[in-house]
Image: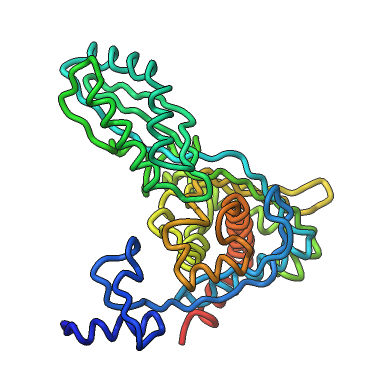
Amino acid sequence: MSITNLRFKEAIHEAIGSKKKVVHNAFKGNVENYIGMTQIPTGLTSPLKINGDFAKGNYQIPLATTEGALVASYSRGAKACSLAGGIKTYYITEGVQRCPAFIFRNTGDALQFDKWVQSQLHHFNKIVSRHSNYAKIQQVSSQLQGQQLILSIRFFTGDAAGQNMVTICTQAMVEYIIQNSPIKILRWYIESNFSGDKKASHQALLNVRGRKVIAEVSLNEEVVHKVLKSSPKNIIQYFQTHLLASLQAGTIGSQGHFANGLAALFLATGQDVACVTEASIGLLNMSIAENGALLASITLPNLIVGTVGGGTHLATQRECLELIGCYGSGNAKKFAEITAALLLCGELSIAAAIAEGHFTKAHQDLGRK
């Protein structure tokens, strides 16, 4: 059904909570051909204690989802981890890539071009500083494939997720290259598809794209029994089956359902939801300590998250970020650690549910009308 111009204006009024003022550009930079808002129920997890490099304290984390049982599951994991003393998080490194491709007449030209590019790094740094107050080049490396050469340019992006930032800076660098290269370039593309942007790749697992964070926790037998309704032994037995099956299936990384928590948190806080594809590439590890406690950790090398830019300024998303003290500059590292801690809670809860045969009943009770 089409919307008349009058009804379209009314839709804008309703979405921004005003019947007196028309704001045609309220969502400029976020959506085109705007007609209204899609409402997604949002819930809060139980308080989660985090002892991190940047996230320190108790956090109730907002999750936007239409899947019953999801918030309950993460809340159960949060309760167990908090009772055990909290989750320790480590912020390892960061960097966002853009990987332009250049096509030459032959491999020799590509090799000469590569040498010339490496001599121009000081020019590139000046170019980037003119186009962004936050972006900084960390590394420029190359991948040679015959007549095709890919430049992998890794940037520091401050508190922004950074995809647009690195694209704009890379475009400016490429324009300089085209104008000044002593080697004839036949064709070029701003992105070769090598960066892993919004894709699952082995490279994503081995390196970093976004922010790399590790979260770990030690749960004693009493907490595992009382809260997760399982035992360290039973969870480890399931984990071994889970790991072998992941290998057999050819999964990149190994985890239970990182995407569940990521999608719900990304929707609630104005992140680029498509980046769940790469952000969910990671590893879960579990073992039993000498004292019988369950040791669990996850490694996330591809958290494309930010606390400025994108959808973070929208009213609801800003409020969700403010709930966990993560809105605005200076909070991206903290937000990344909270994200990692959240996902570890989800891994523990689902592992216990499957290990004890509770998984189906939980969805029957909480996920059906």
> Which is more toward the observer, 365 or 79?
79
Q: Quadrant of residue 355?
A: bottom right
Residue 197: x and y, percent? 37, 45
Q: Is residue 219 left or right of residue 257?
A: right
> Which is more toward the observer, 267 or 5?
5
> Which is more toward the observer, 350 or 7?
7
Q: Is residue 190 visible?
A: yes
Q: Is residue 136 left or right of residue 20?
A: right
Residue 295: x and y, percent? 72, 50
Residue 78: x and y, percent? 67, 66
Q: Is residue 205 visible?
A: no
Q: Which residue occupies 29% across, 73% down? A: 24
Q: Which residue occupies 28% across, 25% down? A: 177
| Up-down relation of residue 104 to residue 321 (above or below) | above
Q: Which residue occupies 67% across, 45% down? A: 90
Q: Quadrant of residue 152?
A: top left
Q: Quadrant of the N terminus?
A: bottom left
| Up-down relation of residue 170 to residue 140 (above or below) | below
Q: Is residue 277 left or right of residue 355?
A: left
How many labels, in total?
0
Residue 19: x and y, percent? 35, 88
Q: Which residue occupies 21% across, 20% down? A: 147
The structure's colour scheme is: rainbow
> Which is more toward the observer, 67 or 167?
167
